[in-house]
Amino acid sequence: SDSGKLKASRYLHFATHGHLAPQDARLSGLVLSTVNEKGEEVNAFLRLVDIYRLDLDADLVVLSACQTGLGNIREGEGLQGLYQGFMMAGSRAVLNTLWSIDDDGTAAFMRYFYKSLLSGSEPKKALSDAQQAMAKSQRWSAPVYWAGFQLVSR
C-alpha cells in the first residue's frame, strides 16, 4: 500500500473516470491503473469503502472525474459519495464535479485553478479565479464548462 506516500502529500489530484453506483454508494469509485513488478499494466478500481480507509493529511484532493460531487442520500447520514470518502479519510477540502464536463474544458479549468493555487491562493479563491477566468474566455464562457466544479471543505 502507498498510504504512507498519500499521507505525506499536501495535494492529491485524480484525473480519471469516476463511477457512481446509484443504488449502492459503496460500489462507487475511481477507475485507476498501475504497473506491477514486471512493468505490466494492471487496471484497478478504488472503491468508496477503500477511500474511507485511507489515512490522509491532504490540504486538497482534486477529483477531476465526472459527477464526483454526487452520491446517495442515506437516512441518518446524509449524502454518501466519493468526496465524502476523501473528507472522512482526512482531506481538508475536495474539489469535485456535479456533472460530466468536457475533457478539454476540464483541462482549461485546471490550468486556471492551479495557476491561482500555486501562486498562493486558498482553494476557495483558486476555484473562484478559475470560474471567473473561464466565464470571461471566449471558448469556455458557457457555464456547462465551469459551473459544475464545487469545493467542499471543513
Image (cartoon, helix red, strand yellow):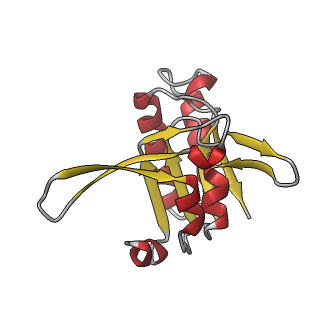
Left of 101 or right of it: where is 148? right
Tell me residue 43's x, y (percent): 30, 47
- Look at the picture and state if 105 lies above or below 6: above
Which residue is at a point 57% across and 45% down the rendered structure image?
A: 27
- Look at the picture and state if 111 lies above or below 2: above
Q: Quadrant of the C terminus?
A: bottom right
Could one spot residue 64 in this view of the protein? yes
- Look at the picture and state if 44 lies above or below 153: above
Tell me residue 78's x, y (percent): 82, 50
Q: Is 45 or 57 nearer to us in this picture?
A: 45
Which residue is at a point 73% across and 41% down the rendered structure image?
A: 72
Which residue is at a point 59% across and 32% down the rendered structure image?
A: 146
Tell me residue 122's x, y (percent): 62, 62
- Look at the picture and state if 84 lies above or below 144: below
Tell me residue 149's x, y (percent): 62, 39
Could one spot residue 122 in this view of the protein? no
Q: Quadrant of the N terminus?
A: bottom left
For the view shown, which residue lies furthest in the left direction?
38
Left of 63 or right of it: where is 74? right
